[in-house]
Amino acid sequence: MKKIRVSIVEDKQSEREFYAELLFESLKAGALGYLLKSDSPAKVLEAIEDVHAGRSAMSPVAARKICAYFAEIAATPNPLAKLSAQEMRTLELLAKGKTYKEIATSLSIATGTVRTYLSRIYGKLEVTSRGEATALYGRGRSR
C-alpha cells in the first residue's frame, strides 16, 4: 500500500506565520502536498490523485509561501563570503573539531596565527564563540 503524504491545514490570517513553519516542517518530513482546509473537496481529491501518481500537490497560497521563503534566502548574503580563503580553511578545520594546535599544524602556521584568524573570523561573522561560528559555517555551506 502506497502512503499518501499531504498536509491539510486551516489558513487563518492570525496564524499564517505558524502555518508557514508547519509547511516547511511538513515538506522536510516528506510531505508531497500541502493544501488548505478551505480548498474544495474536488481540489483535495485532485491533490490525492496527483500525489499518488508521483506529482506534488500545492495550494497557490502554499506555493507563494515557498517562493517567498526562497526569495528571502537568495536576497540574504552569505556571511561566509566575507572570509578570506585562509580564514575559510581555518573555520572549516574548527568546524571539524580540530584544536588550535591541530589547525596550526594542518595550515603550517603558528598557534598564535590561528587565534588571530579566529578573532577576525568571529568579528566578520559577528559571533562570539566557536559554537556560533561553526553553526554559521554549517548553514552557510548548505546554501
Image (cartoon, helix red, strand yellow):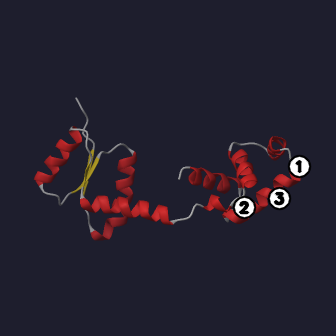
- Report the Cα–Cα distance between label 3 and label 1: 10 Å
Mark 2 and mark 3: Cα distance apart in space:
10 Å
Indicate which label's residue lies in the foreground, 2 or 1. 1
What is the quadrant of residue 38 in the picture? bottom left
Residue occupied by mark 3 = 116
Q: Is residue 104 above or below residue 11?
A: above
The residue lying at 63 percent from left, 53 percent from top is 137
Instruction: Provide residue 48's location: percent of width, then percent of height.
Output: 19, 44
Mark closer to the chain start, 2 or 3: 3
Percent x, y of residue 27: 36, 48
Neighbour tally class for label 3: few under 14, some 14-19, many 20 plus, Cα within 10 Å: few
Q: Residues within 10 Å of mark 1 (few under 14, many from 20)?
A: some
Residue extending farthest front: 85
Q: Residue furthest top?
A: 1
Provide the residue designation for mark 2: 122
Residue type at mark 3 is Thr
